[in-house]
Each structure stands twice: as C-alpha cells, then as structure tokens.
Amino acid sequence: MQIVKGILTVIYFIICLALIILVMAQSKDDAGLSATITGSSSSNFFEQNKGRTKEGKQKKWTIILAVAFVVLGIALSIIYPA
C-alpha cells in the first residue's frame, strides 16, 4: 500500500506542475465589456475551429489536467485519512 501512496503522490505532483505551466502559458482572451457592447460574434470561422489551434489544445489539456487533479486529490484524501 505504501508503494501505491508514493506513486499517486508523485503523479499528483507532476499533474500540479503541468497544470501550473499550462495555466501560466495561456493567453488572456477575455474581451470584457467591449465584446458585450460591440456584439462579439462566435459564429465566425476562427471561433468555430478554435479547438484545432494551439490555444484550443492548451485549453483542452488544462481541463483534462484539472479534472485529473480533482479526482486524484479525492483519491489521496481517501488513502491518507486525517
């Protein structure tokens, strides 16, 4: 059981570092109030194919790592009781 705890802890640490790096590498694409006033549309070609770009892939991996972070955190809290 100690080996499983060690492996899960190392994986958790690697996911934490990867998540931090991905979040810091993402660009801020928040248009804010100006998009509301000007009526920024998401029906253009770029917005429809955004998942294929570098930013889209970073966002997808950030979501995947965030879910893994939460699931592994719950698993570690069960393994390491208080």
Image (cartoon, rainbow, N blue to C red):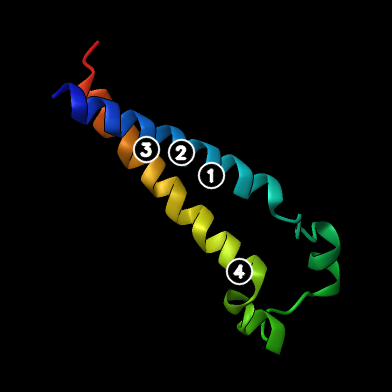
60 relative to 24, above or below = below
Q: Nearer the viewer, mark 4 or mark 3?
A: 3
Residue sitting at the far left: 1
Q: Residue type at mark 3?
A: Ile
Asked if residue 18 shows in the view, the reply is yes
Residue 69 position within the rendered picture, expressed as x and y whole percent measured from the top left: 40, 40
Residue 51 position within the rendered picture, expressed as x and y whole percent measured from the top left: 57, 75
The residues bearing labels 2 and 1 have C-alpha atoms spaced at a distance of 6 Å
Q: Quadrant of the C terminus?
A: top left
Residue 45 position within the rendered picture, expressed as x and y whole percent measured from the top left: 69, 89
Asked if residue 44 shows in the view, the reply is no
Where is residue 11, by image quadrant?
Answer: top left
Left or right of 53 in this view: 13: left
The residues bearing labels 4 and 2 have C-alpha atoms spaced at a distance of 22 Å
Residue closest to the eye, 9 or 32: 9
Marked residue nearer the N-terminal end (4 or 1) = 1
The residues bearing labels 4 and 3 have C-alpha atoms spaced at a distance of 24 Å
Q: Residue type at mark 1?
A: Ala
Residue 22 position within the rendered picture, expressed as x and y whole percent measured from the top left: 61, 49
46 relative to 23, above or below = below
Q: Which residue is mark 3?
A: 11
Q: Which residue is mark 1?
A: 18
How many residues crowd around disc 1 within 10 Å: few (fewer than 14), some, or many (20 or more)?
Answer: some
Q: Nearer the viewer, mark 4 or mark 2?
A: 2
How many residues crowd around disc 4 within 10 Å: few (fewer than 14), some, or many (20 or more)?
Answer: some
Secondary structure of the residue carrying tag 4 is: helix
The residues bearing labels 3 and 2 have C-alpha atoms spaced at a distance of 5 Å
Q: Residue type at mark 2?
A: Ile
Instruction: Give the label on residue 14, or none.
Output: 2
How many residues crowd around disc 2 within 10 Å: few (fewer than 14), some, or many (20 or more)?
Answer: few
Secondary structure of the residue carrying tag 1 is: helix
